[in-house]
Amino acid sequence: MLYRVVPLTLTSSQVSEDSTELLVDEFNSRFNSNELLIVKNNDHYEVRLREVVIKQLEMVVAELQKEERLNSSILSNVLSEIKSQSSYGLSGKKRVYVGYNEERKIEGRKQKEARRGRHFYTNGAEFDEQSNDVPAPYTNRILCGDSESVLANLPDNCVDLIFTSPPYNFGLGYDAQEDSDQWQNYFDKLFAILDECVRVLKHGGRLAINIQPLYSDYIPSHHIISKKLMESKLIWKGEILWEKNNYNCKYTAWGSWKSPSNPYLKYTWEFIEVFCKGTLQKAGNRDDADISADDFKKWVVGKWSIAPEKNMKAFEHPAVFPEELARRVIQLFSFKGDTVLDPFVGVGTTCVVAKKLGRGFLGIDNSEKYCETARSRLEEQLTL
Ligand SMILES: C[S@@+](CC[C@H](N)C(=O)[O-])C[C@H]1O[C@@H](n2cnc3c(N)ncnc32)[C@H](O)[C@@H]1O
């Protein structure tokens, strides 16, 4: 029979072995072994978990906690350990912890994938695999200028990760531009910069782009930009939903209140679209991966709940993203020692985090004021 095995800490200096055994017996006697079973395996205990009604589990724990001879905090640990396990879904009222492969087993998966054509839109891609170095005047710098022109000075295939948030054309009023161009002009300019980004990205490098569409103009920028990058033959690796928990518009913007005539959809999140050049696999030394097991497990679930940046006023910039967002992207998609580029660096968040994490960096912005702030943030870091 299939189980998920979860190690448990049932022993403590205050609890005798007899008392633990008693607790295990009492606990097991209240469940069917098809549901769950605590067993001793050599010197430790584990729960073999198959399916369970959480409400019933809570009731059993509450009932056993009334018995003085059983250790209440150990019972609480068992409960929270089981509740922290993610299940594959519900069968009736039971949470199901095993059997995903059986239910989802697809016969001849490989042949079917080949028939469908995985990332078929990259067929015919001809990316050179030879990497180049970023020239010294562009290494670990914040440069002021138009990104299209600045990037034209870099060789092909020289950066490992691009993480950026372009202007969204919302009319935010950046220092060096209004941010409210005709949509076609906006996309033409953005695409010219993205062409340069694709060119300077190494084979195996990643481009992660944070986008918030302008819903009130009915422009799905995240789809338009993703289509452009797929036409540039990058592989779409996936999408991260950045849950900011704040609305993109007034809470009272209903469109047509209580009527289907034209309800207005509201959002509390932005997107990060992630692309790879040439291959999904990134070359790198395992020792240069600096992500913990816990962070890895959390961050590969593509919904990140992170509060928006609180210091925008102090930075005098209207659209700064939080360091935590950059940290996750950088640690999940690059190795220590890699080079990270942000062609719309604003007040330097990507580069500040890249530096902290032992990556090389290049940040570009067309506002000298923002570049100055970015440079001082990097200097402050030096003195920390
Ligand atoms: C959304 S903000 C990026 C903010 C940044 N992520 C941060 O945390 O500070 C976009 C930035 O792009 C810059 N920008 C707009 N057009 C540009 C261009 N053609 N070349 C370089 N930077 C540009 C703006 O000045 C603005 O700071």
Image (cartoon, rainbow, N blue to C red):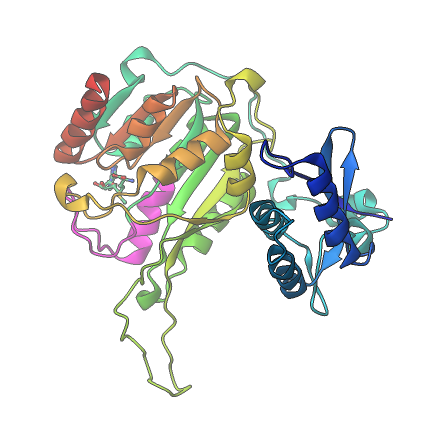
Using residue 328 as the reference point, say whether residue 190 is left or right of it.
left
Question: Is residue 341 among the parts visible in the rendering?
Answer: yes
Please report the residue visible at 42 percent of the width from the left and 86 percent of the height from the top: 260
Using residue 191 as the reference point, say whether residue 144 is left or right of it.
left
Residue 128 horizontal/vertical position (percent): 55, 23
Residue 118 horizontal/vertical position (percent): 68, 44
Q: Is residue 360 above or below residue 89?
A: above
Q: Is residue 185 shown in magenta?
A: yes
Question: Is residue 285 among the parts visible in the rendering?
Answer: no
- Of the 4 image quadrants, the one containing the C terminus is top left
Residue 221 horizontal/vertical position (percent): 39, 55
* Residue 209 found in image quarter: top left
Q: Which residues, given as a range, are shown in magenta?
A: 168-193
Residue 107 horizontal/vertical position (percent): 86, 50
* Residue 137 found in image quarter: top left
Q: Is residue 38 shown in magenta?
A: no
Q: Is residue 324 above or below residue 58?
A: above
Using residue 301 as the reference point, say whether residue 189 is left or right of it.
left
Give the residue furthest to the top.
136
Decide which of 287, 341 is in the foreground and name it.
Answer: 287
Please report the residue visible at 33 percent of the width from the left and 60 percent of the height from the top: 214
Count of marks, rendered view:
0
- Please tell me in which quarter of the rendered image ligand 1 is found: top left
Using residue 111 as the reference point, say whether residue 321 is left or right of it.
left
Q: Is residue 297 above or below residue 268?
A: above
Decide which of 345, 358 is in the foreground and name it.
Answer: 358
